[in-house]
Image (cartoon, helix red, strand yellow):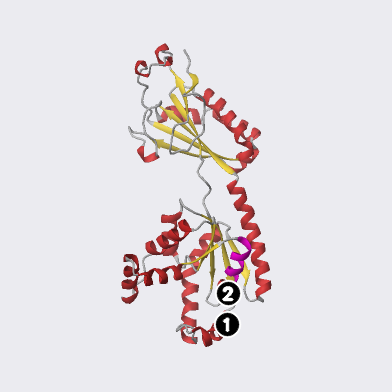
């Protein structure tokens, strides 16, 4: 008798991947499996492979997509070796939006950030300011920062990123300007390691300005700022450091198409007009991101050979063609896939059991 698609629980639901509780499963030919008494159900065979498909859809197409996936699952589960499947919907709240603000010393980042905060409800965070505040706080973390600075050492990026995350967590806002960070490749690596799951980098505002213009601004500021580094010798060293260390960061985000360049040599009002145009592009992309939902399907397969047979089949090709026809936007964005080895435990994948059925 062929496998059939059954619902587990009262109805088919779509929950977070972590919960792994929204299930589609095949029933065996055994009548005992369909009984209400769970103890009478035979133990299902172990799956050795999980094939994962992730599709990103807009909220408006979600109902149609999940109906299509349910029908698709019922057909796939008729194949030899396909023991069951789970259909998930990622329902986590959208990550907060982060804009990195970079530019040489004297480029006018602070002036423009203040206007952005007033007009667009951003929280403005400066890594340098957070480090200085923590150092003065007298906390255990502040004492550690003080020791690094007194010994002439660079404060570990883990501490800087932790301070940024703490400030973001405390803020009621969901948009953040992070000023002067990441300054170098080490900063970028630390951010990605600690924050990739907690925030979405929507862009980099790069304030470009000739060094002679920035130097003139800093020397003028130095007349009243009291900053020891607002002198000609220190300014030139800061320019050299910025050019050398920030370039890898800019190259990385340029490849992602996220750098918004602003001519910062213009008058303040003109610069801000350019900033507003850049923000419009960032916000449009972010609105699209927030309107999207990921649907993930896990297929539990007895062996890799049986999975590969399906992936090479006409049935698989026809299903992809049908998906592209029914949901062109999803097809354009692609379908992310991966194969997970079960080997008796699915804990590395956030699932609670290696069996095909819950």
Residue 7 position, x and y percent, is 49, 23
Q: Which residues are magenta?
A: 111-120
> Which structural element holds mark 2?
loop
Q: Which residue is mark 1?
A: 217
Give the side of residue 266 with respect to residue 148, left or right: right
Residue 52 position, x and y percent, is 47, 36
Q: Residue at x 48, y 15 (%)?
A: 2
Residue 115 position, x and y percent, is 61, 68
Give the side of residue 144 with respect to residue 51, left or right: left
Could you say which is closer to the camera, residue 162 or residue 50? 162
Note whether 277 is above or below 265 in the view shown. above
Which quadrant holds residue 271? bottom right
Using the image, tell me which numbered label, if any, was put on residue 130. none
Note whether 116 is above or below 209 in the view shown. above
Note whether 220 is above or below 1 in the view shown. below
Which quadrant holds residue 352? top left
**Label 2 with label 1: CB-CB less than 8 Å:** yes
> Which structural element holds mark 1?
helix
Which quadrant holds residue 51? top left
Q: Main secondary structure of the magenta part?
A: helix
**Does the magenta-highlighted stretch encompass residue 76?**
no
**Does the magenta-highlighted stretch encompass residue 118?**
yes
> Callout 2: few (<14), some (14-19), or many (20+) C-alpha neighbours within 10 Å?
some
Q: Which residue is mark 2?
A: 108
């Amino acid at each position: 008798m062929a496998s059939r698609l059954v619902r587990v629980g009262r109805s088919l639901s779509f929950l977070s991947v972590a919960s792994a509780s929204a299930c589609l499963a095949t029933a065996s030919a055994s009548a005992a499996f369909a009984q209400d008494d769970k103890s009478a159900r035979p133990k299902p065979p172990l799956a050795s492979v999980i094939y994962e498909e992730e599709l990103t859809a807009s909220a408006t197409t979600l109902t149609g997509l999940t109906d299509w996936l349910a029908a698709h699952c019922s057909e796939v589960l008729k194949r030899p070796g396909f023991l069951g499947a789970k259909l998930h919907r990622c329902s986590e709240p959208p990550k907060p939006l982060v804009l990195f603000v970079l530019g040489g010393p004297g480029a006018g980042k602070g002036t423009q950030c203040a206007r952005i905060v007033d007009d667009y409800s951003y929280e403005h965070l400066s890594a340098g300011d957070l480090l200085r505040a923590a150092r003065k706080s007298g906390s255990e973390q502040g004492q550690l920062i003080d020791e690094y600075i007194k010994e002439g050492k660079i404060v570990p990026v883990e501490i800087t990123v932790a301070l940024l995350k703490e400030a973001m967590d405390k803020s009621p806002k969901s948009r953040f300007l992070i000023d002067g960070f990441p300054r170098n490749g080490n900063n970028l690596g630390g951010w990605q390691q600690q924050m990739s799951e907690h925030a979405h980098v929507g862009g980099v505002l790069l304030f470009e300005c000739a060094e002679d213009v920035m130097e003139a601004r800093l020397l003028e500021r130095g007349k009243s700022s009291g900053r020891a580094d607002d002198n000609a010798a220190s300014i030139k060293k800061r320019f050299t450091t910025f050019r050398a260390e920030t370039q890898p960061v800019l190259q990385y985000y340029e490849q992602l198409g996220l750098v918004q360049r602003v001519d910062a040599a213009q008058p303040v009002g003109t610069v801000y007009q350019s900033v507003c145009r850049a923000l419009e592009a960032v916000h449009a992309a972010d609105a699209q991101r927030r309107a999207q939902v990921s649907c993930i399907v896990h297929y539990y397969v007895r062996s890799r050979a049986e999975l590969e047979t399906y992936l090479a089949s006409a049935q698989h090709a026809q299903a992809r063609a049908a998906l592209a026809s029914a949901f062109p936007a999803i097809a354009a964005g692609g379908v992310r896939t991966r194969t997970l080895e079960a080997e008796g435990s699915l804990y590395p994948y956030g699932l609670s059991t290696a069996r095909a059925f819950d």
